[in-house]
Image (cartoon, rainbow, N blue to C red):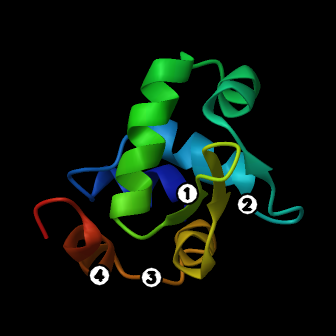
Amino acid sequence: MDISNVFSRVSWLRPVDIAILEVLGPPQRLSLNRGAISKNIDYSPDYVGRRADLLVSCELLDIDEDGGPFYSINDTGEKVLNRSISTEDLEALGPDG
């Protein structure tokens, strides 16, 4: 199953969210600011920052404000990439869940 199909069934997720998770995710598990993320996925830094903040509030990313903000993927975000979380559970993590 294509990961974009999983995301298409979750009302609050966008293609940029997939891209952010993929940049930060395995194998390296990077910690990057919105500018560095945007350079790697071809979205504006402002849009990346808004979406990354949403992913933090939905518990898919962690944020380090010290000298940042720097965003990093957490275990729940990795479950999304690995497709080991149900669409229902993912929907529930959303801003309206």
Amino acid under disc 3: Ile
Q: How far apart in space, not on screen, are marks 1 and 2 (Cα)?
A: 17 Å
**Sequence-first tag of 1 and 2:** 1
In the picture shown, does residue 15 fall above or below 30? Answer: above
Q: Judge depth for marks 1 and 4 and give the one in front.
A: 4
The residue positioned 75% from the left and 29% from the top of the image is 36
Q: Which residue is mark 3?
A: 85
Q: How far apart in space, not on screen, are marks 3 and 1 (Cα)?
A: 14 Å
State the quadrant of the C terminus: bottom left
Q: Which mark is residue 25?
A: 2
**Sequence-first tag of 1 and 4:** 1
Q: How far apart in space, not on screen, are marks 4 and 3 (Cα)?
A: 7 Å
Q: Are marks 3 and 1 in contact (CB under 8 Å)?
A: no
Q: Are marks 4 and 3 in contact (CB under 8 Å)?
A: yes
Q: Which residue is mark 1?
A: 2
Q: How many marks?
A: 4
The x, y position of residue 81, in whole percent, is: 61, 66
Q: Judge depth for marks 2 and 3 and give the one in front.
A: 2
Quick check: 68 left or right of 60? Answer: right
Q: Judge depth for marks 3 and 1 and give the one in front.
A: 3
The residue positioned 66% from the left and 42% from the top of the image is 68
**Sequence-first tag of 2 and 4:** 2
Q: Which residue is mark 4?
A: 89
The residue positioned 89% from the left and 61% from the top of the image is 28
The x, y position of residue 95, in whole percent, is: 18, 59
